[in-house]
Each structure stands twice: as structure tokens, then as C-alpha cells.
Image (tube, rainbow, N blue to C red):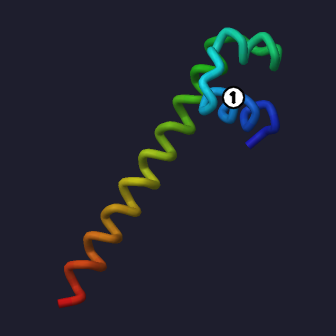
Amino acid sequence: MSIEKEMAVAMAQRGVSKVNIARVIGKSRQAITAWVKDIDVDLNLIKTMALQAVAVEGSTND
């Protein structure tokens, strides 16, 4: 991931608006929105996989 994307995601996680992120980084608001959505999807997938792994682990320890 590029430094710009990492900065955008970090700022979004801290509650900075996409308009202000776009101003700081010098990209369009649409680009920032796409980056943040991509990261949110990745994080949700990781959380789901982790929860499934815990559920499977717990069910086999009988």
C-alpha cells in the first residue's frame, strides 16, 4: 500500500472527513472514498475469518 493510502486510511480511522483528507493528500474525494472502502472490506474479511477460526477451534476442543 502506498504512503498516501496508508495516510488516508489512518486519518479516516481517526474521524477526519474525506474532504479534508483529499485536501491534505492532494487526491480527489472519490479516490479517498475508494481507498477507505477497500480497507474496510479487507478488515471485515479478516475479522470474519478470525471469528470463524475461533469458532472452529472451540468446537474441536471437546
- Can you identify the residue that label 1 sits on? 11
How crowded is the residue under tag 1: few (<14 C-alpha within 10 Å), some, or many (20+)?
some
Nearer to me, 24 or 2: 24
Residue 60 in the image, given as x and y percentages of width and height? 22, 85
Q: How many marks?
A: 1
Q: Secondary structure at mark 1?
A: helix
* Residue at position x 81%, y 19% in the image: 25
- Compared with 4, 21 (above or below) is above
Which amino acid, mark 1? Answer: Met
Q: Which part of the image, by quadrant, shows the N terminus?
A: top right
Residue 57, compared with residue 39, is above or below; it is below
Q: Residue furthest bottom?
A: 62
Q: Position of residue 41 (x, y in %)?
A: 47, 39
61 up-or-down from 26: above or below: below
Quadrant into which the C terminus falls: bottom left
- Expressed as whole percent of the image width and height from the top left, the position of residue 24 reads 81, 16
Quick one: 21 or 28, which is closer to the camera? Answer: 21
Q: Using the image, determine if residue 45 lies above or below residue 12.
A: below
Q: Residue at x 63, y 15 (%)?
A: 18
Say which quarter of the image contains residue 15.
Answer: top right
In the figure, is residue 20 to the left or right of 52? right
State the residue in front, 30 or 57: 57
Q: Image check: 26 left or right of 31? A: right
Q: What residue is drawn where x is 46% and y is 54%?
A: 46
Farthest front residue? 14
Q: Position of residue 14 (x, y in %)?
A: 63, 30
For residue 59, which quarter of the picture? bottom left
